[in-house]
Amino acid sequence: MMVLITYDVSTNTASGQRRLRKVARLCENYGQRVQNSVFECLIEPYQFTELKFELEKAIDSETDSLRFYYLGSKWKGKIEHIGAKQNYDPEGFIMI
């Protein structure tokens, strides 16, 4: 299933900056960054459950926020890209 994850983490303090790095790292483990605080994650439901649990632990719910957009298994027709950043195939190979 495809899930779009967005987040807004308050970075006014050192702990906020640490939370931001942790949230980004967690998302990078499961998906591809498509904008600064936006990740496309092509993952299995059990993986999403794990990721969501870890993200909820990582944020401060008083100052930070997470948003999950469930695009499901028929996501291909629901994403359109226009602009400078190069598009990618989430089902293709990623070279590291």
Image (cartoon, helix red, strand yellow):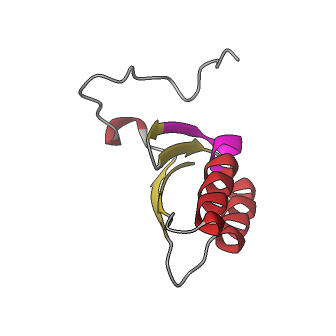
Residue found at the very far left of the displayed protein: 82
Residue 91, how many percent across, how many down?
58, 27
Residue 37, how many percent across, how many down?
46, 50
Q: Check the picture and name the quadrant holding the C terminus.
A: top right
Residue 71, how many percent across, how many down?
44, 52
Give above or below for 73 relative to 84. Answer: below
Specify whether 54 is left or right of 23. Answer: right
- Count of marks, rendered view: 0
- Residue shown at 71% from the left, 73% from the top: 57
- Residue shown at 43% from the left, 42% from the top: 75
Q: Residue 82 lies in magenta, yes or no?
A: no
Give above or below for 95 relative to 60. Answer: above
Residue found at the very far bottom of the displayed protein: 62
- Residue shown at 50% from the left, 23% from the top: 89
Give the magenta-colored segment's residue range. Answer: 27-33
Specify whether 36 is left or right of 53. Answer: left
- Residue shown at 51% from the left, 63% from the top: 11
Residue 18, how many percent across, how many down?
67, 59
